[in-house]
Amino acid sequence: MPELPEVETIRSDLKLKVLNKKIEKIEILDEKVIGKDSKKRYYNLKDLKIIAIDRQGKLLAFLLNNNKYLLVHLKMTGQLVFKTNKDIIAGGHPFSIKDKRKAVGNALPNKHTRFVIYFSNNKILFFNDMRRFGYVKLVSKDEWLKIKKSYGPEPLKKEFGLAKFQSILLKRKTPIKAVLLNQKLVSGLGNIYVDESLFLANIDPRRDAVSLSKQESEKLFKAIVKIIKEAIRYRGTTFSDYVDSEGRIGNFSNKLKVYGRQGQSCLKCDNIIKKVKVAGRGTHICDNCQK
């Protein structure tokens, strides 16, 4: 699933592609993607423009020039694919025009296409989702602000300070990994970057959050900030051909120290990396380095 660095990469790149382009048509190929909303609300977006793209954690918000927000959440297998006359560029879940086995689909639209925005000059944005967990939702500005407030502080933003982070951990008798994955407590982190941050901080993901000392929580705070900054700089992590909205694969995978390395030697101590289950998620750990 795309995490904060991947979704931020999509957001920043799509700004160069769709801003101030007139919407000529909306096509809804699967009503599940809009939930209980009326199709008419989306068809009425014709002739409007996207004037900004916001984000909260892993949730994208396209601001329209009628002051409404079109929200897009990729969830597990969602992808955004932007197509022009000459190019196909994608971000999110794997997309390949050559290898169907690794992709949601190699044709556009395909059987996994749920929602399509047609822009002027033959530019098209496809929202595909194989497992149908993702969604598109049209909301007012007030609704968007309310949704944003329901999320926890996000790494790299001002509200994600050390004192705030330590207050989140205080008295929480649940595994630290579960706390970091809880979007209402910390926004934007997922399995990959939580495992990497805990490894960098030498903290066992199975420990209760409340058990961390001030020194440990500060070390973890700094590790999260460092990992997320670096992942954004390298345009995300690539698994099964993750491609950003410029068509470039993420290349933070070469920097991973623990995630996906089960059975291999720890890069710090040569101990064998294990994969265990924590908070219902596959979790990578060096039980020699992480205490």
Image (cartoon, rainbow, N blue to C red):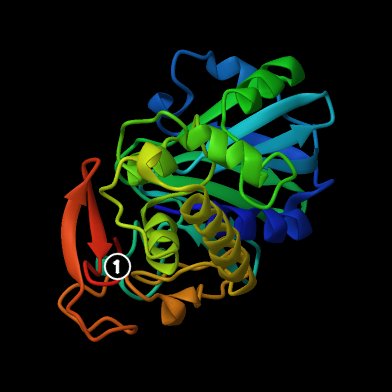
Above/below status of 164 relative to 282:
above
Residue 135 % position (x, y): 47, 32
Q: Would residue 90 be seen by someone viewing this image from the given angle?
A: yes
Q: Left or right: 183 with respect to 111?
A: right
**Is any atom of residue 81 visible in this view?**
no
Above or below, 67 relative to 289: above
Q: Specify whether 285 is left or right of 17.
A: left
**Element carrying mark 1:** helix
Above/below status of 253 relative to 216? below
| Number of numbered tags placed on the structure image | 1
In the image, 233: left or right of 31?
Answer: right
Q: Quadrant of the C terminus?
A: bottom left
Amino acid beneath label 1: Lys
Q: Which residue is mark 1?
A: 102
Residue 192 on image: x %, y %: 39, 60
Q: Residue at x 45, y 61 (%)?
A: 197
Q: Which sits in the foreground, 36 or 224?
A: 224
Residue 89, percent from left and from top = 57, 66
Above or below, 54 relative to 184: below
Q: Quadrant of residue 225?
A: bottom right
**Residue at the location (34% across, 56% down)?**
104
